[in-house]
Amino acid sequence: MANNIHFKEYKCTQELDIALAERIADLLKCSLQQDSEASLVLSGGGTPLGLFERLSNKSLDWENISVTLADDRWVDLTHQDSNERLVRERFLINQAQAASFVSLKNSFLSASKGVLKLEEEFPPIKLFSATVLGMGGDGHTASLFPGTESLDLGLDPYSSRNFISSVPSDAPHERVSMTAPRLLASKEIFIHIVGREKKEVLARALSGKDAHELPIRLVLNQSKVPVTIFWSP
């Protein structure tokens, strides 16, 4: 495992959620002290729900914290599959309701057209304070899926693009996703995974280099940003 990658294992998801929420809160506090503002990138799905609850109750200067997503499905914000809806309902509550949310979704009917507007409107955040990523059983992270037409652009380390549209072959909905350069523009990255199957995928990812096969490798095979993997059975 690379020197900048650390692995933390917990007995249960509750222990993991407590520890990860504490670590993220510390990073946000540090950014607030240094820059008077902070930024946090989250991912959707069921895995981070406990984290959302723990972190949303942290006593922070949330008024000066921006929250956004690594990716989202190009659906209406009331749709059950919307990551934005999930974050608004399960994270932007309690203390965290004072945070400002930066949406990835706009009024365009397709993500392929919407990402062009998103490039223009997304805030010029040089470095995110913290980025939380998940990982699918196929090794995807954010909405960078193996085999998609836009994956080359999404993984290009020299791309000037912050976002791409993505159409997974085996997952519903057109997507919008941060690109590799935008995801890696963070002070620290956390990979949040649960279950033995995901640990096996992680082991495969750590044993190879091809990010097209397992896109999570874009994070694991770089030395620019500290990465901590939080895992529980």
Image: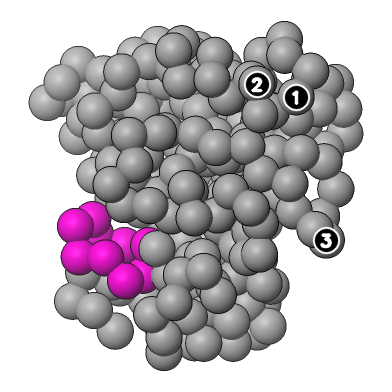
Residue that lies at the very extreme toward the left in this rendered image: 34
- Provide the secondary structure element on which disc 1 rests: loop
Q: Is residue 3 left or right of residue 90?
A: left
Which residue is disc 3 drawn over?
170
Does the image show residue 183? yes
- Rendering coords of residue 72 (x, y %): 66, 36
For badge 2, the amino acid type reads: Lys
Which residue is disc 1 drawn over?
110
Dividing the picture into quarters, in which one does residue 77 lie? top right
Quadrant of image for the C terminus: bottom right
How much space separates mark 1 and mark 2, taking CA atoms? 6 Å
How much space separates mark 2 and mark 3, taking CA atoms? 22 Å
- Rendering coords of residue 166 (x, y %): 66, 44
Which residue is disc 2 drawn over?
113
- Provide the secondary structure element on which disc 3 rests: loop
For badge 3, the amino acid type reads: Asp
Rendered position, 94 above or below 71: above
Q: Is residue 106 left or right of residue 155?
A: right
The residue positioned 62% from the left and 37% from the top of the image is 165
- Image mark for residue 87: none
The one of 132 and 176 positioned closer to us in this rendering? 176
Check whether the beta carbons of the residues at disc 1 and disc 2 lie within 8 A of each other.
Answer: yes
Q: Is residue 84 left or right of residue 189?
A: right
For badge 1, the amino acid type reads: Ser
Q: Is residue 68 left or right of residue 207?
A: right
Disc 2 packing (10 Å; few <14; some 14–19; many ≥20)? some
Rendered position, 54 above or below 115: below
Disc 3 packing (10 Å; few <14; some 14–19; many ≥20)? few
Between discs 2 and 3, the one toward the N terminus: 2
Inspect the magenta stretch and tell me whether residue 200 lies in it.
no
- Bounds of the magenta segment: 219-230
